Amino acid sequence: MPYTKAQLEEMAKKFPPPGHPHYMPIEERLKLYEPEFEPDDEEEETEVTTAGTKYAELKNKLAEARKQMEETAKTAFREMSAELFEANPDLMAFSWTQYTPYFNDGDECVFRSNGEYPTVAMMINGQLIAYNSDYGRLEINGEKARTREEYIRSFENMPKTVTSYIEDGHTIAFDRLTNTVTKDGMVIPTYEDYSKQFDPLERIVGKFMSNFEDDDLKAMFGDHVRVTVYRNGDIDKEEHEHD
């Protein structure tokens, strides 16, 4: 029995018209929906991956080169330090600070080493004396000591009748006529006296330190530290507090 017009119209609604992809084999239909530029996308992804790998390899090479340079610089520093001590028998140790300022009056805070203004420790008359001209701090055999000026200020705060007193078992005496202070009968040097003793070695060590770039010193010893180099080749680092 032939279909009526109404039946044909209803069937047309349910089934696609002739030539529609619905009537094609499934393999051919799948090809219609494949991305047009898929091969190019794969090529681009491969290029990105290759570039990333090369960059990672480059970073590793740079890190290894920096490490090798740091070790080379440390070796050179130790060898040159040994030569410095050998040429200056009285020099027992030297130290300096290096850090990046936390504030620099609005200017950029840049790492710097103060190696050209070192603190030196030297042997004088059998005593190990260290003097830091930046802080005016004097140490004798590892203990804080005072200059004549400091002792005079102490006597000025006492009655004029006081000419001596005992400090840590030592007799400190003040002669007001000659303006001299003695410790167990030995004249205590002035600030200027100590400066004259330390200035030559400070200049020698400062010139030695000028051979090294700040970046090299930072790589070798770090930031925000005080570095001390001893005659026996030991090197100590301690945290340095600063503004």
Image: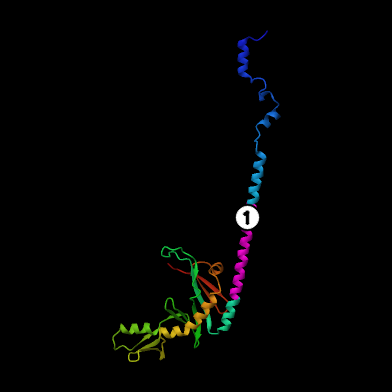
Q: Which residue is mark 1?
A: 56
Q: Label 1: state its secondary structure.
A: helix
Q: Quadrant of the N terminus?
A: top right
Badge 1 density bin: few <14, some 14–19, many ≥20, Cα 10 Å = few
Of residue 108 and residue 132, the one placed in the foreground of this image is 108
In the rendered structure, which amino acid carries the disc numbered 1? Ala
Q: Quadrant of the C terminus?
A: bottom left
Could you say where residue 145 lies in the image, as x and y percent from the top left?
Answer: 42, 81
For the stretch drawn in magenta, what is the main secondary structure? helix
Quadrant in the picture for residue 187: bottom left
Q: Colour scheme of this structure image?
A: rainbow
Q: Tag count in the figure?
A: 1
Q: Is residue 50 visible?
A: yes
Tell me what residue is drawn at x 59 percent, y 71 percent: 74
Tell me what residue is drawn at x 64 percent, y 60 percent: 61
Report whether 229 appears left or right of 136: right
| Residue 166 lies in the magenta-colored region | no
Tell me what residue is drawn at x 63 percent, y 57 percent: 58
Tell me what residue is drawn at x 56 percent, y 81 percent: 85
Could you say where residue 230 lies in the image, as x and y percent from the top left?
Answer: 54, 78
Of residue 56 and residue 105, the one placed in the foreground of this image is 105
Could you say where residue 7 lies in the image, as x and y percent from the top left?
Answer: 62, 12
Of residue 33 and residue 145, the one placed in the foreground of this image is 33
Q: Is residue 168 visible?
A: no
Report whether 108 appears left or right of 12: left
Q: What is the span of residues highlighted in magenta in the rendered image?
A: 52-78
Report whether 186 appears left or right of 208: left
Report whether 128 appears left or right of 50: left
Quadrant in the picture for residue 216: bottom right
